[in-house]
Image: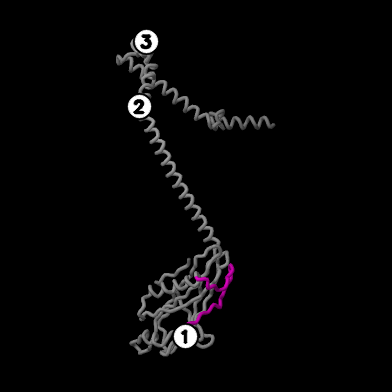
Amino acid sequence: MSLNVAEFQFRRTSREHADVFAMGDPGTARRRRHILLLGLLIVVFAAWIQWWASSGFPLEGRICDGAEPQNNCDSYNVVLYSAWRLAKILEQWGVLISALATLAIAGLAWSLWQSSEKSWLAARHSAAMAGHALVAGRRAWLSIDNLKIIHPTEITEAGARIRVSFTLKNFGQTPAIGVWLNAAHWFYSGPETYVSASEKFIAGMRNVVAAGIFGPIMFPNEVADTARYTWFIDAETVKKSIRIRETDGQKLLDFTLFVGVSYKIDGDETPHLTFIPYDWFDIPVGLKLSEGQAIGVSPAAFSPAIAD
């Protein structure tokens, strides 16, 4: 039964592959190419001899002995004579040919060195990218969500106290080290530009972690839903930033809240940061939040956030 199966398989293979005996021998095609190339060279050589003879060129050449060039000159076939002449030419120009060969070898070595350096740089870049991808896939990532203005926030012309709460979560796969929270404000009517104020806030967040002023550790999937931060605004700043609503004369404030968290990750001394600006408009002067009251604030629509 096994013999019949083998015969059937051979017949099926023979139909699908006419050259069945060449299957599995990768050198067959290469040997065929070599034989064809040799045959082509023989044909070209025969055609050259035929052309040489038909053009009236001599089919023999005289090769003289170097010791007695006048008395010992024998005639040889044109092929042997051509080989002898080529050897003489190579001997005569041997120094130049050696110099050209040396230059060619030097050029080849330089090309190989350049190619090796490029390959090394490409391999190094690929390794770095793979390392960054691995770190990015497993590192800590901290998010800021659900920002609210809470008690005892109070805004008066004599000054303001602002308290915020938000949810902080590590949704990465490794701990976040030295977690540091901060919040600040920027008044639209103030003397400082938004870009300057935000850059100053971000730089301060990074510098704190870089200086080694560490906070707590947040482990993977850990959630801090009671994160809070309080800061004060002096009376002069509040008064300079007040605007009057024309319809009812109400005194209002408009500002952006900067909220950020900076930290480090295992094996990387670079300070990482999550920074989100929040817009809080039409705040009535005299606002005072009692226990249990909260005002939700949304991220600024046209101001860039950062997560690195």
Identify the residue at image location x=37%, y=10%.
72
Quadrant containing the N terminus in the rendered view = top right
Of all residues, the one furthest to the front in this rendering is 67
Q: Dot 3, how many residues are within 10 Å of its Cα: few (below 14), some (14-19), or many (20+)?
A: few
Q: Which residue is mark 1?
A: 161
Q: Quadrant of residue 171?
A: bottom right
Q: Residue at x 43, y 39 (%)?
A: 109
User: Magenta residues?
Assistant: 211-231
Residue at 39% in and 80% down: 187
Vertical order, 279 against 81 (above or below): below
Residue annotated with mark 2:
93
**Which residue is labeled 3 in the image?**
72
Chain-order first, disc 3 or disc 2: 3
Q: With 197 as the anchor, is 229 left or right in this view?
A: right
The x, y position of residue 299, in whole percent, is: 45, 74
Distance between mark 1 and mark 2 Cα atoms: 95 Å
Q: Is residue 37 magenta?
A: no
